[in-house]
Amino acid sequence: MTQGDARIARLPIVSTWPIVDGGKFAVKAFAGEVLEFGAIATREGHDQLAAELSLISPSGRETKSRMQAASPGLDQFLLKSQLSETGVWRYQVITWDDKFGTWAHNAKIKLEAGIDQDLVILQGQHLANEFLGVASAKDKKTLKAIIAVLKDPEIEPAQAFENALSLGFEQLSHRSPLRGLVSTSEPVRILCERQLAGSGAWYEFFPRSEGATKDSVGTWVSGTFKTATKSLKRVKNMGFEVLYLPPIHPIGQSHRKGPNNTLVAEGDDPGSPWAIGSSSGGHDAIHPDLGSEKDFGAFVGSANKLGLEIAMDFALQASPDHPWVQSNPEWFSKRADGSIAYAENPPKKYQDIYPIYFDEDPEGLVEEALRLLAKWIGLGVKIFRVDNPHTKPVSFWQAVIEKTNEEHPDVIFLAEAFTRPAMMHTLAKAGFQQSYTYFTWRNSKSELAEYLVELSQKSADFFRPNLWVNTPDILSEYLQFGGRPAFKIRATIAATAGPSWGMYAGFELYEAVARPGAEENIDNEKFEYKPRDFLAAEKIGSSLAPRISLLNKIRAEHPCLGQLRNLVVHQSADDAILVYSKHLEAEFNEGVADTIIVVVNTDPTSARETTVSIDLQKLGLPATFAVKDLITGTVFQWGAQNYVKLDSYAEPAHIFQVVQ
């Protein structure tokens, strides 16, 4: 066995957490997030050891906090801490010989057994004298009182021991520990970013659809940034914090697609916004139909005044008409016949889009990406939803995100990556602040329970999920065939199970056409204008908007729902009733504990009744407690076992606030 790095410390610290790939990548956190810090530390024999968390903030302020022993027999120490300052934090775990803990442990056993009682008390006196050398002036007074108690011959040893504890001997030992045999773990980095990097509600609309009309001869007239500005209040009234826009750039004419991805576009078909580039410009230009840069800047400013941030699509691909095709042919891959290869995802073909080839000029492409990002950041955009990042080299994204965040640490990148888990996780480690997930395809109770545990516990140190309920072109079978209850169920789970969630325009109108065997949304907005009368739908009760507003209101009022790592799945006797909770301790919420319990029927076609089992210990709850349903306002008395009945056609969920 080699020496050096393999040497074991005097008091071995076996592992610490959170940590990502042994410290290769920084742990992810966001402002206001509560993290559990842990360590496994052990030592020989029965003597005790103490553990402390040293946490250094980005500004250099160090705090040291005693960790608590947990899971008897597993040598585990835990402590929760809430990060507030953004930037790079560092933590280490420090262990030492816990002389007080060893004495107190042995003393209790021996005094109860009547063994070496006088010797135990004498050892306590010696220990108290040692503490005199490190204690504060105030604690020295307490120590002298403790010594006096331990020396008093009129007091029986067992009583003297209890008196010493009641005087605060243990608390004093924590405040001014005797640090012997000190061991320290390797430092671990934590990147704490702004709150929206990890917690927020997102909405999407196409500016061209907001205000689109037909003229007197039936030709479509595109909506603009000015007409879309009128829709901002509607988005804000539903409680959203981020408004995401698909690409707003010029769209190519070559091979332009018509409705439903047909190969031939008619005269006024707008084409796919992801077919970027025309004679009007590329990724640094705005589609002439939408308005000018000044109009865009005014749109962003109006959104910001309402408390909305604008997220912009960043899609590194080009239409055959993009200026890059002529200026930088090396950025495109050639087929065997010499033509430029268009995008494919067999059997799907995207003849209107050229993918980028990254290996001919990687440095040039990084510089171009940084130039484009700087342009839009300068116009007030701080959030980018990156289209298909898994089809580009991860090293490219790592360089682009790192360099962007060096200058603009508040910029957020969301990875739109529905792909293999290893790639999704690698993109997150490379720097993406958030990622799309498999939530769309996790619909049953068992699927959801397993996946939510994975997202909140197993991958939370590096992967921040955003639970989108739909996309412009993907319509899951669950939504195709589940009717309106399915929409309500999916929104309820997404908004309460994850700190970040999102929906695309039209979801609140229950847009769904059943197409057995097909997952692509018919008449989807990628290829056509789609103006909607949201107000009319709400007036006749055909809108989910009131429910969306309620969900986002509940999120705003309950900070436990804005946390990632605190989800606990509870049990029910029914295979469709999903139960989970989110809890935030009082110390992290201005002295008031915040607990939400969600019970939801995942079967949109039936009524279910069952017994729900709540893990009271995990939530710190008494045997009986009151819960208030935040959907109906009804109050119930609950305990470990509870009866529920949920009819998906009437109301598929309870969102309970614990009001003990």
Image (tube, rainbow, N blue to C red):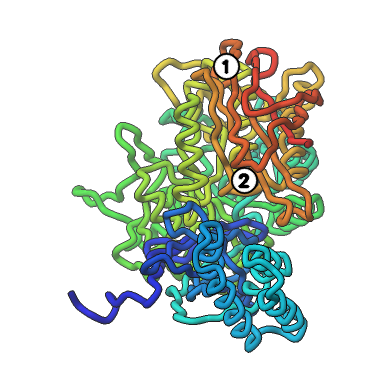
Q: Label 2: which residue?
A: 499
Identified at 69% across, 50% down, the residue is 585
Q: Residue 407 at x, y = what percent?
A: 58, 74
Q: Is residue 190 left or right of residue 555?
A: left
* Residue ranking furthest to the front: 154
Answer with the quarter of the image where residue 469 lies. Answer: top right
Of mark 1 and mark 2, the one earlier in the sequence is 2
Q: Camera-side residue: 377 or 133?
A: 133
Q: Residue furthest bottom?
A: 133
Q: Secondary structure at mark 1?
A: loop
Please give the name of the residue rendered at 52% of the width and 54% of the height, measured from the top-left corner.
Answer: 314
- Disc marking residue 604: 1
Percent x, y of residue 426: 39, 55
Report the residue at 77% width, 43% height from top: 557
Residue type for callout 2: Pro
Under circle 2, the secondary element is loop
Q: Residues within 10 Å of mark 2 (few under 14, many from 20)?
A: many
Q: Position of residue 288 (x, y in %)?
A: 63, 49
Q: Is residue 51 left or right of residue 535?
A: left
Q: Nearer the viewer, residue 534 or 457?
A: 457
Position of residue 111 relative to residue 618, above or below, is below
Q: Is residue 630 visible?
A: no
Q: Quadrant of residue 7?
A: bottom left
* Disc on res. 321: none
- Tell me: 333 left or right of 13: left
The percent coordinates of residue 59 (x first, y second) are 64, 78
